[in-house]
Amino acid sequence: MEKSIRSIVHSLPSKQAGMVKSDRAIRLDKGEFPYPPAPQVISAIQAAASGINRYPEVLTNTLRQALADYNQVELDQIFVGNGSDDLIELVLKICIEPGDQVILPVPTFFVYGAASQMLGGVTVAVPRQADFGLDVAAILAAITPRTKLIFIANPNNPTANLVDRMALIELLDQTDCLIVVDECYFEICQTTIAAEIEKYPNLIVLRSLSKGFGLAGLRLGYGITNSQMTDYLYRIAQIFPVNQLAIAAGMAALANLDYMETKLAEIKKERQQLAEALQALGLKVYRSDTNFLLVSCKSWHITSASLVAQLAQQEIFVADFGGKPGLDNYHLRIATGTPAENEVFLATLQTLKP
Ligand SMILES: Cc1ncc(COP(=O)(O)O)c(C=O)c1O
């Protein structure tokens, strides 16, 4: 069997099963929306369930039209997929031949690197500036004839910041490499570059219904780009890129924007209170345009790995980013939970303060 396995597969690490968490667990480690989705979304999934003996609509045009209306673009400027993770891979599939290069301003979302390597791409890490802004000159200097793609998460994960719009425009002006601007947190920050898709044919904007609409478990993402690019992407995509329940849920979520807006206002208020409470405990909290906070525990003279492990013992889960590319050993990422979750988290954290 080994002779049939691509050599790149041997060089990739095995995936580890996720830890099973109890119902009591406070889960602030995955940057999730802490509330259930809108009641209308749950009803729509229930109503669609009896029809799942049928395949979904080819190309999913009904959902694409709803997303086009939501974004005030045309249907053929929208493509959909099984979460933005799936779309990150799809974009790579249309442009990466083995050995081609992908530029990643680091620190950034790990899936870009993992997916690039899986497809035979070579990642080129370009450090961000001290405030985690883009170093446009360094990115431009890193471009070679083999550079096919640049991934820019905006806002970025795990650093939570938006990059300067003029830096993005400068990059778009200076290169014809594909530029993916990943706007997974758009509903939270309301900042987008999508209006530029016709001006820059190399621009692909990615979006997700995981964060703002609370559909992470369903896996639904989409992208906005020009119609030629959409056509290329769909040539490579599976014929049924998203499932029937995700289509029903996505349509219902888009028809009930009030729910999302109300919940996001609560999340942003909680994020502010959480940030202030963490600062009051002496921790460094970075500015956030997402639903999570990047925090440094250096002032506590304790590594993030140790702090995260101590919290996990009490069934409180936050994400350790200590030692990840571009970060020192003291960084952790904490999602905004419900008020009750944040209260328990803060009370527990207080007990761990050295
Ligand atoms: C920047 C960024 N892009 C994409 C994703 C993945 O989103 P999805 O759930 O749509 O696959 C995440 C998830 O945390 C993210 O932070």
Image (spheres, helix red, strand yellow):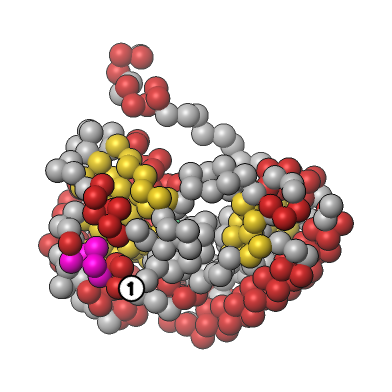
Residue 145 belongs to the span the image colors magenta = no
Give how far across and how far down residue 71 sits, in percent: 31, 78
Name the residue that disc number 1 marks.
165
> Which residue: 59% across, 37% down?
17
Q: Nearer the viewer, residue 199 or 212?
A: 199
Q: Nearer the viewer, residue 293 or 11?
A: 293
Magenta-highlighted residues: 169-173
Asked if residue 216 lies left or right of residue 113, the reply is right
Crowd around label 1: few <14 · some 14–19 · many ≥20 (10 Å): few
Question: Where is 269 relative to 133, above or below?
Answer: below
> Where does the N terminus fall, quadrant-wise?
top left
Which amino acid type is shown beneath numbered disc 1? Arg
Picture quarter containing residue 129?
A: bottom left
Give the overall secondary structure of the magenta segment: helix
Asked if residue 201 lies left or right of residue 124, the reply is left
- Asked whether residue 192 is in view, the answer is yes
- Asked whether residue 220 is in view, the answer is no
Question: Where is 275 relative to 141, above or below?
Answer: below
> Could you say whether the residue bearing mark 1 is in a helix, strand or loop?
helix
Asked if residue 234 lies left or right of residue 347, the reply is left
> Which residue: 30% across, 60% down?
136
Asked if residue 354 lies left or right of residue 191, the reply is right
Give how far across and how far down residue 179 sits, in percent: 25, 58
Give how far across and how far down residue 62 sits, in percent: 29, 71
